[in-house]
Image (cartoon, rainbow, N blue to C red):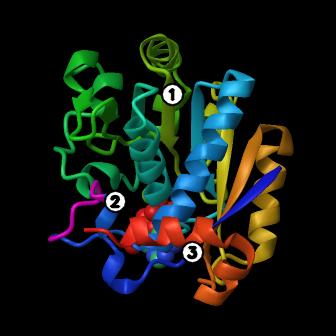
Amino acid sequence: MKILSMPVMKETDMPSDRKNIFDPHENDPFYSEAMRGLRAKVEHRIDAAGFRALGVTSAVAGEGKTKIAIQLAVNVASTGRKRVLLMDLDLRKSDIAREMRIGATPGLSEYLSGSVSREEIIRITSTRGLFLIPAGKPGSFPVDMLAGEKFRSFLKELRGHFDLLILDTPPILPVPDALTISEQLDAFILVFRLSYTPHKFFRQAVDELGTGKIMGVVLNGDEKKSDNYYHKYYGKYYQVAHTEGKRS
Ligand SMILES: Nc1ncnc2c1ncn2[C@@H]1O[C@H](COP(=O)(O)OP(=O)(O)O)[C@@H](O)[C@H]1O
Ligand SMILES: [Mg+2]
């Protein structure tokens, strides 16, 4: 299991109504740099293993799944090498459409309940090569929807149309949704938020998911290291990345 850490974002760097999450220069340079590292590792791994459908999950809510799923999708699509589909499978707490300022309905739940066609739910985003399927209106039985044959065949179809599917799933411990679809996905990225999630919850999530299915763990909210730390270990590389991140 590979481990990668994401630093704490500065308060002012978090998305607000005035900020556009697609503008990498508006982000915290430490966070952007860590995200580029995550993107490179994920791409390397999926290319080597031939993975196409990745879930992003965590033990409990609020660990940063949605943030990481969005940023990873934007970063992979931005390289221009892959057509990426980001899909919100958190039918109970669907945040992606709002974060990306794209209409929340119709979405997956409308498609699965048969009221719209699949063409109506695939949105084009402002990032070239990145498409989005929002969760739609929360249905009464999200697990049944995700466990059904319609979702299974839809996912198969999508694999044929995109190079990478990134699926933002609900947390593992409170609800069975992620485990329900686990067998249909190639691998999961497990997000663990430091100083937030009790370790025993994390261990329980790893047990439930099974280590074989976990491609890597993202330690979210890691301590930001001082400039000296980066200079010592990264030297010039750090200087370049830091300056790039600051450019506006
Ligand atoms: N590395 C981080 N540093 C600071 N805040 C973060 C970080 N990652 C996520 N957040 C914030 O934490 C909250 C929960 O993140 P979110 O991605 O919605 O979690 P989840 O999807 O796991 O419930 C959001 O307000 C998000 O902006
Ligand atoms: Mg979320």
Write down the region rendered in magenta.
18-23
**Sequence order check, earlier mark of 2 and 3:** 3
The spot of residue 45 in percent (x, y) is 71, 35
Q: Quadrant of residue 17?
A: bottom left
Could you tell which of marks 2 and 1 lies nearer the N-terminus? Answer: 2
**Residue at the spot 67% in from the left edge and 58% down from the top edge:** 173
Up the image or down, 25 lies above or below 86; here it is: below
Disc number at residue 7? 3
Instruction: Look at the numbered disc 3 and say if its residue's Cβ is closer than 8 Å to ligand 1.
Output: yes
Mark 2 neighbour density, 10 Å: few (under 14) some (14–19) many (20 or more): many
Residue 229 in the figure: left or right of residue 131: right
* In-front residue for pair 40/209: 40
Residue 141 position, x and y percent, is 44, 39
Q: Nearer the viewer, residue 177 or 163?
A: 163
Give neighbour class at mark 3: few <14, some 14-19, many 20+ (Cα, 10 Å). many
Read off the residue under disc 1: 164
Q: Earlier in the sequence, mark 3 or mark 1?
A: 3
Residue 190 visible somewhere in the drawing = yes
- Do tag 3 and tag 1 residues touch (Cβ < 8 Å)? no
From the image, tell me which residue sits under label 2. 24
- Residue type at mark 1 is Leu
What is the distance, in whole Å, between disc 2 and disc 1 at their CAs?
21 Å
